[in-house]
Amino acid sequence: MFDRIVYIGDQGAQIKLKDKEHLAMNLMNLHLVIEDENKKILAEVDDLQDDIVKVRFLGEIVNGKLVGGVLRKPKIDASIRVIEQSEIPMIVGRDEPGYMLLGVSPFYNDHPVYLDVNNFFSNHFAIFGNSGSGKSCGISRIMQNMFMDKRLFPYKSNILIFDASGEYYNAFKDLNRIDSNYHYRFITTNETDGIGEPLRLPIFLLNETDIALLLQASNHSQLPIIERMLKLARIFAQGGDANRYKNHLIAKAIMTILYSNETSPHKRNEVFSILASCSTPEFNLESPVQGIGYVRKFRECFLIDSHGQFSESVLLTEYVSSFIHEEFDDYEPPKECYYTLEDLEKALNFTLISEGWLRNEKTYGDSVTLRVRLHSLITSNNAKYFSSPSGRYENLETYLSNLIISNGTKYQIININLDDVDDDFAKVITKVYSRLLFEFTKGLKNRASIPFHILVEEAHRYIQNDTDRFLIGYNIFERIAKEGRKYGLILGLISQRPVELSDTVISQCSNFLIFKMNHPVDVDYIRKMVPNISDDVVEKQKTLQSGTCLGFGSAFKIPLIVKLKMPDPMPKSGNCDVVSIWNGNINISHTPSVSVQTQPVVEETKQSFITQQGIKEVNNQPIVMSETTQPVVEGIKPSFITPQNMGGVDNKLDSSTSPIVMPETIQPVVEATRSTPVTVQNTNIEQTPNNQVVSQPSNVINFGVSTNNQPISPMPATDTISPIPEVMPGDNNGNTPPTFM
């Protein structure tokens, strides 16, 4: 087949064919072995030009194993041959410990393709593809294969799936049917469907950066306010001296006002404003102030005399000063304590008066914005997600431990459904959980001793080039992408729009599964962002069938086209079955009238007319039709809606509903070759005075044609959807995937 090498370059070579008869063979993407007495080089056919085959070097074969890269180029007189059957496993992997079944190779007669588990799951990975290309089915199949592999037994796995639409519940809900030691946990924001557990992320586990994201902080001046707010919330949560500390803050704020250069009326208004939002049982406008021989309410101390001064200025200052305790200025609260969103709001009010931010015009607007957003959160439906499941404080380790293990049950997959919240809030939840996991894994004494995998569905909605790094100094997903691997925290991105993802995160991914992608912007983005990817690899994915992906990276010997089996069970990620819905059985409570008039029959070569008597010919073949015959479209076997099964809203038409009147025409009959006799049975015909034909159908209509001249029985009306194929679309081999049974 191959004559000789005519050109050797840095990345490949050109090979001359012995004769042009071989051009009829499918040589594209064929793997060749170029060998001499010192080395073997694996190459792949990239291009064909007349009798010249262009190949790209993939690696060297050393002791029966493929080593990526080519240090020494082959000799010009090296021999060339097609890879042998026994050598295919060094490309697609072997069924051995540390490997799991991924799918089959369509290029090698559906030879099994095995995935290097360590190399894949120890590094960040990404799964890209158009909507409907098989991404969700692909990750479901991979996870199912992993748990069904008895050699792996991933009992200690900790996989968190951030599910944008709850589609993975069906795929993993029966995980324990594989093995009784496996368990799946479904945590959801949708508390109305009765499935799973409600999402609860206690507010006291959130740090300053989390709160900044939650309240959508937009500039650096808001960060000190948030930091101070959290400090005060922890102080107030301690009880004991909490009120004394509040009184101290109120008193200092009032003294600052009293010694300012403002007019007395202005001072009074400011003091009253402070006490309206921040007060205690001991210190408020109605508090008694003891003078010499008399008692006044605190508000009465702000009467203004004829000189424009407070008449009780001495009494006022002495009373306020009595609440100031300088030792509180350096007080540091415990970092771990229980508090609620409402406690945060109170702490924010004291924060603003304690630091005088409300009197600073530069930060006043920012402060008001934070107060409004926090109050809106408290009064919204989202507030419930930040309550504590136990109603008491639990630290990060305890919370994560209870997330993974509950009532003695170890969960391998925790699915967090974010279907019931908007994208902005879902992004915050995803980032907070990711930050908590990063802090936990980073703090482990034995590095990477408890690995976690974060799978983010619809990742382009959450992992973006956000402004986080400019506001808080980092983006948590970018930090995990750069540092998480060494701590055992691994990201898995699933997205249909890689162009909208963070450049930094994608660049840190070591393995990719690329399903069909057509958008040139996304294709070009992958080409630019993924290191060491060839144009040939990028172009291959454009022609992939649904359920087939291009896999490449550290877990693959070479870039491979892999066909995955359908997961069993399936995720709820399929398209709406419009045809099945359209053809569904619809009941009505009465029979509508249908008017019919003749129309021409459309043919490729000639047209004829069907009269009310119903007999004419098309392509020299008779057509027998009654006046109530429905249209026939060759090649389609529909379930026709008869007057008995027409319906309206809720599949019913009540007595008040107007009859459905069909157009007074018989629709054209479209034939590709020739027509077949069509009959209508059990139909009663009634002639109206205006020569219209009104049908009163009964029972069953037998109607239709087929391409083999056999009548087609009407498709039974049903609400069921056609069975799910055993393999992803494009698999014609009838392979049956393993099940959970």
Image (spheres, rainbow, N blue to C red):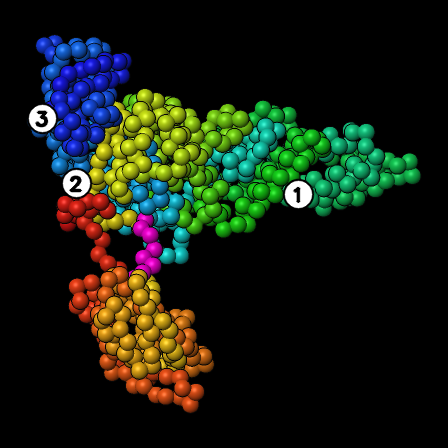
Residues marked 3 and 2 touching at CB (< 8 Å): no
Q: Mark 2 = which residue? A: 148
The residue that mark 3 highlights is 84
Disc 3 residue type (three-letter):
Glu
User: Residue at the location (26% across, 31% down)?
Assistant: 551
Q: Seen in the image, is 149 located left or right of residue 540? A: left
| SS assignment at label 1 | helix
Q: Which numbered dot is residue 277?
A: 1
Nearer mark to the viewer, of 1 and 3: 3
**What percent of the width, then of the height, locates residue 142?**
23, 38
Distance of label 3 from label 2 (alpha carbons)? 31 Å
- On the image, the x and y values in percent for residue 589 come to 36, 80
Residue beneath the point at 57% across and 30% down:
223
Check the image and report above or below for 53 versus 242: above
122 drawn magenta: no
The range drawn in magenta is 573-580
Q: Sequence order check: which comes first, mark 3 or mark 2? A: 3
